[in-house]
Amino acid sequence: MSIVFVPKKLRGKAKVNQETIQRLLDENDQLVRCITEYMQKGRAVECVQYQQILHRNLVYLATIADASPDGMTPASNVSTNDASTPSVNGCAGTQ
């Protein structure tokens, strides 16, 4: 499960720190690699799931950045407002 998506009962209670942000950035890197690999193989339909997760991650990171004072690392509580989706631990099913 993507670290961005938290069960409803825990929303708004998650601490956002540098480690969380770095994990999201690393996950986004893997998502982009998977999307690129699928596109090169002509499997655009399979890209949609990964593109949706990437989009949600980017919106979440942008929300954190917008809520943070300029030049400061976010360390405050940030709530999430989306449902759970599978995460990417590699490009499953690529051939």
Image (cartoon, rainbow, N blue to C red):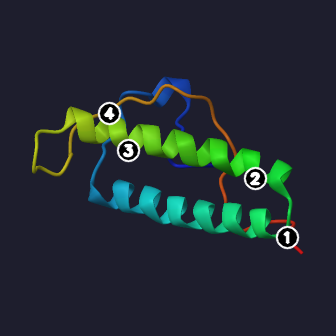
> Residue under circle 4?
78
Foreground residue among 90 and 32? 32
Disc 3 designates what residue?
61
Q: From the viewer's perspective, tell me whether residue 45 is left or right of residue 9.
A: right
25 sits left or right of 17 in the view: right
What residue does disc 2 label? 47
Residue 70, given in percent of the width and then of the height, sits at 10, 43
Query: At x 27% / y 52%, what residue is drawn?
Result: 17
**As shown in the figure, which amino acid type bears the numbered disc 1?**
Thr
- Residue 39 in picture, x, y percent from top left: 76, 62
Which of the two labelled residues, at mark 3 and mark 4, occupies the earlier sequence position?
3
- The answer to the question of whether label 3 and label 4 lie on touching residues, with beta carbons closer than 8 A, is no
- Residue 94 disc label: 1
Real-space Cα separation, disc 3 to disc 4, in angstroms: 10 Å
Measuring from the top left, give residue 3's x and y in whole percent. 51, 49
Give the crowd class for mark 1: few <14, some 14-19, many >=20 residues within 10 Å. few
Residue found at the very far bottom of the displayed protein: 95
- Please name the amino acid that badge 2 sits on: Cys
The answer, for residue 4, to whether it is visible in the render is no
Q: Is residue 81 left or right of residue 66?
A: right
Quadrant of residue 37 within the rendered picture: bottom right
> Callout 4: helix, strand or loop?
loop
Which labelled disc corresponds to residue 55? none
Q: Quadrant of residue 24?
A: bottom left
SS at mark 3 in the image: helix
Residue kind at label 4, given as amino acid type: Val
| Relative to 23, residue 11 above or below | above
Q: Give the left or right position of residue 26, taking residue 42 as reference.
A: left
